[in-house]
Amino acid sequence: MATPRKTSYRATRIRGDRPAEPARTAVDNTPVERIADPARPRGVIDYGLSRRADLEALRAGGALTSDFCDADPYLLRAAKNHGEATERPCPVCRRSNLSHVTYAFGAQLGPYSGRVKASAELPQMAHEFGEFRVYVVEVCQECSWNHLHIAYTLGDGTPRRPPHRPADLLD
């Protein structure tokens, strides 16, 4: 038994019939997500309970200070040069206030993924990129204590190709 031939797109255009338009998709065939306010955090994860448990273990003597005061030198340098000062004292040494260091990660950021960003830059980035994840780390520059404070997602929901890597970009 012969099977009927499929109608090609060209043949349907010749006859005047138009095939149904496919649903709007982004570059990588993922559906476009509608976001009312791209600069409003979504998917928020607060690490306050984990922080509290770590501090309780430290104060109860179940852990060493060196287990928690082990910030990477790059994190300490980022806190010193790019961190945003807070009014909260360090819960371990209580000698200085904590600094918040904000990192942005995402495939759509391309070569700029994993960079330190000022919190003032994030609303503008939320309108320029479809989706990226923001991580805020609190750091004490005196005793090197650090802990992930909060993580959330920003972006307008429209997936885009990452920007091209500039020739003069240093890693």
Image (spheres, rainbow, N blue to C red):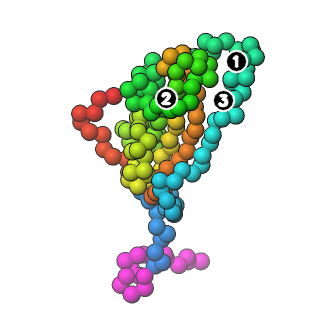
Nearest the viewer among 6 and 126 is 126
Q: Residue at x 59, y 17 (%)?
A: 93
| Residue position marked by numbered label 1 in the rendering | 58
Horizontally, is 125 left or right of 54 in the view?
Answer: left
Nearest the viewer among 160 and 134 is 134
Badge number at residue 99: 2
The reply to whether the magenta stretch includes residue 13 is: yes
Nearest the viewer among 20 and 60 is 60
Q: Residue at x 43, y 30 (%)?
A: 83
Which residues, given as a range, are shown in magenta? 1-18
Q: Quadrant of the N terminus?
A: bottom right
- State which mark lies toward you, 2 or 1: 2
Earlier in the chain: of badge 2 and badge 1, it is: 1
Q: Position of residue 38 (x, y in %)?
A: 47, 56
Horizontally, is 33 left or right of 8 in the view?
Answer: right
Circle 2: is it few (<14), some (14-19), or many (20+) Cα within 10 Å? many
Q: Amino acid at mark 3?
A: Arg
